[in-house]
Image: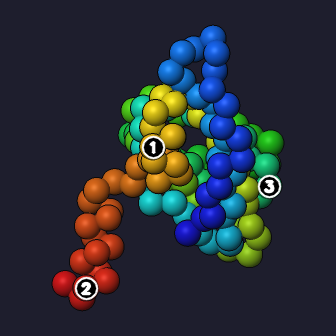
């Protein structure tokens, strides 16, 4: 599973109630994020290192190399977000415009909302069901 850290969090004075939040996501080789959404945020992403495999909503799966970018509209379902390499790490910077209250109250956990079905499947797997 990737390591996710907030690297900046700035209230936007020209957009009351909104903040720009930067998440630095470090993918070890052959890792991926669970399917997720981003709490109604608009998300712009740049690949800083490595290559990632990406699929959003019902769109195609595509490969994004270092320097490549993509955008997630509010409500977007991020189905696949994988490090494409089995031997090298990858890193992305996700910049979100999100309700300030969400990040203040919930931090990273509130910004990356993992699909409930995935969470339940992992719980069942862990309990041997």
Residue found farthest to the left:
129
Depth check: give the residue in front, 96 or 16. Answer: 16
* Residue 49 - label: 3
Q: Secondary structure at mark 1?
A: helix
Q: Secondary structure at mark 2?
A: helix
Which residue does the image show at 66% across and 37% down from the upper left?
Answer: 9
Q: Earlier in the sequence, mark 2 or mark 3?
A: 3
Per the image, the residue denoted by label 1 is: 105
Per the image, the residue denoted by label 2 is: 127
- What x and y, as percent, mark residue 53? 60, 54
Q: Secondary structure at mark 3?
A: strand
Q: Is residue 5 left or right of residue 124?
A: right
Say above or below: 55 vs 126.
above
Q: Earlier in the sequence, mark 3 or mark 1?
A: 3
Depth check: give the residue in front, 101 or 20. Answer: 101
- What x and y, as percent, mark residue 24? 69, 51
Which residue does the image show at 63% across and 21% down from the upper left?
Answer: 12
Depth check: give the residue in front, 61 or 39. Answer: 39
**Of tags 1 and 2, which is closer to the observer?**
1
Q: Residues within 10 Å of mark 3 (few under 14, many from 20)?
A: some
**Of tags 2 and 3, which is closer to the observer?**
2
Which residue does the image show at 33% across and 73% down from the upper left?
Answer: 122
């Amino acid at each position: 599973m990737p390591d996710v850290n907030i690297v900046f969090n700035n209230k936007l004075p020209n957009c009351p109630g909104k903040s720009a939040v930067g998440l630095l996501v470090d993918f070890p080789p052959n890792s991926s994020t669970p399917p997720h959404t981003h709490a109604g945020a608009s998300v712009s992403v740049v690949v800083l290192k490595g290559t990632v495999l990406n699929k959003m909503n019902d769109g195609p799966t595509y490969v994004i190399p270092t320097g490549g970018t993509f955008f997630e509209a509010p409500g977007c379902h991020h189905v696949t977000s994988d490090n494409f390499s089995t031997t090298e790490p990858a890193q992305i910077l996700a910049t979100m415009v999100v309700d300030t209250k969400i990040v203040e109250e919930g931090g990273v956990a509130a910004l990356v909302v993992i699909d409930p079905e995935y969470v339940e499947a992992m719980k069942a797997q862990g309990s041997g069901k």
